[in-house]
Image (tube, rainbow, N blue to C red):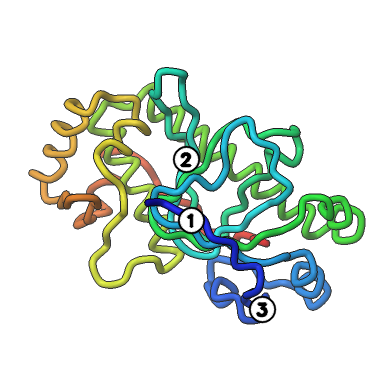
């Protein structure tokens, strides 16, 4: 059974955050680090399959993914869903609910996930006293829009094979920059996740992924996709890859 467990009594000190040493993230100033340490209220742990945020909900909190994989999605009344994007360590979730009053999408854990918890009521203090952090939040929102632009282009104009190659290459590159792979380069997604992201039937998705596997680019496992040839996937998708610029996080 999927569960969400509050762990507010335990808080990884921001000074010892495992994400800070990664070269993909920018450094905090002393004042920024001090503010974020006080802004953070605790941590939350979830199992794979747990719902972290629900569309239409009013959440009192913002979250930064500390570890694990998840995805954002919208669902129709009959249960069909569209996966909008995937979340990984360093990603901020819940901002939409803070700005618009309620969440316009849901967030589910793909793997066990741990999250840093922030009180949204203190967000205005961040904007008033720490403009550099306020700019970081704006940057993250713009980056999310940039990724969604690319995803929409993929769904609207790429072939099924190009769509699948792009999605797996995109997830691989993001995870590789975050050093999420330990040994085999596996992404914890099922073929249903791929179908719900690409807007394809599960049958069409299976046939498309088999073509990539036959070319030696991926190896499909029971609940994961092992990436064998990331450069080949990028070539099929005609995609240049994830930006290598340093990025902020809270």
Q: Residue at x 27, y 33 (%)?
A: 162
Task: Name the residue nearer the viewer: 62 or 197.
Answer: 62
**Quadrant of res 190:** top left
Quadrant location of residue 105? top right
Residue matched to label 2: 85
Of callouts 3 and 1, the N-terminal one: 3
| Quadrant of image for the C terminus | bottom right
Q: Nearer the viewer, mark 3 or mark 2?
A: 3
- Seen at 35% across and 31% down, the residue is 196
Mark found first going from the N terminus, 3 or 2: 3
For the residue carrying disc 2, how many other residues have a C-alpha within 10 Å: few (<14), some (14-19), or many (20+)? some
Q: For residue 88, which numbered disc appears in the image?
A: 1
* Residue 164 pos. (x, y %): 28, 37
Contact, mark 2 vs mark 1 (Cβ under 8 Å): no
**Under tag 2, what secondary structure?**
strand
Q: Residue furthest front?
A: 1
Badge 3 is on which residue?
A: 13
Viewer-side residue, 90 vs 214: 90
Nearer-the-camera pick, 229 or 39 = 39
Q: How many marks?
A: 3
Please give the name of the residue rendered at 43% of the width and 34% of the height, measured from the top-left corner.
83
Label 3 crowd bin: few (<14), some (14–19), many (20+), radius 10 Å:
few
Q: CA distance from mark 3 to mark 2?
A: 29 Å
Q: Is residue 108 above or below residue 180?
A: above
Q: Is residue 141 left or right of residue 188?
A: right
Residue 143: assigned label: none
Label 2 vs label 1: CA separation?
A: 10 Å
Of badges 3 and 1, nearer the viewer stands 3
């Amino acid at each position: 059974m999927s569960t969400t467990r509050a762990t507010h009594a335990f808080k990884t000190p921001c000074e010892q955050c495992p994400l800070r040493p990664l070269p993909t993230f920018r450094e905090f100033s002393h004042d920024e680090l001090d503010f974020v340490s006080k802004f953070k209220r605790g941590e939350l742990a979830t199992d794979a399959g747990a719902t972290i945020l629900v569309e239409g909900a009013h959440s009192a909190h913002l979250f930064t993914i500390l570890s694990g994989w998840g995805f954002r999605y919208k669902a129709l009344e009959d249960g069909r869903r569209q996966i909008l994007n995937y979340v990984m360590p360093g990603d901020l979730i819940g901002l939409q609910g803070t700005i618009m009053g309620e969440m316009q999408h849901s967030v589910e854990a793909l793997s066990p996930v741990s999250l840093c918890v922030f009180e949204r009521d203190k967000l205005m203090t961040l904007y008033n006293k720490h403009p550099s952090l306020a700019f970081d939040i704006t940057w993250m929102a713009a980056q999310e829009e940039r990724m969604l632009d690319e995803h929409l282009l993929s769904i609207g104009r790429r072939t099924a094979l190009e769509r699948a190659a792009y999605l797996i290459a995109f997830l691989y590159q993001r995870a590789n920059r975050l050093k999420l792979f330990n040994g085999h380069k596996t992404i914890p997604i099922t073929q249903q996740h791929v179908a719900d992201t690409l807007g394809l039937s599960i049958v069409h998705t299976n046939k498309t992924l088999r073509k990539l596997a036959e070319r030696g680019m991926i190896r499909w496992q029971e609940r994961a996709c092992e990436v064998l040839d990331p450069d080949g996937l990028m070539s099929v998708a005609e995609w240049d890859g994830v930006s290598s610029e340093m990025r902020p996080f809270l």
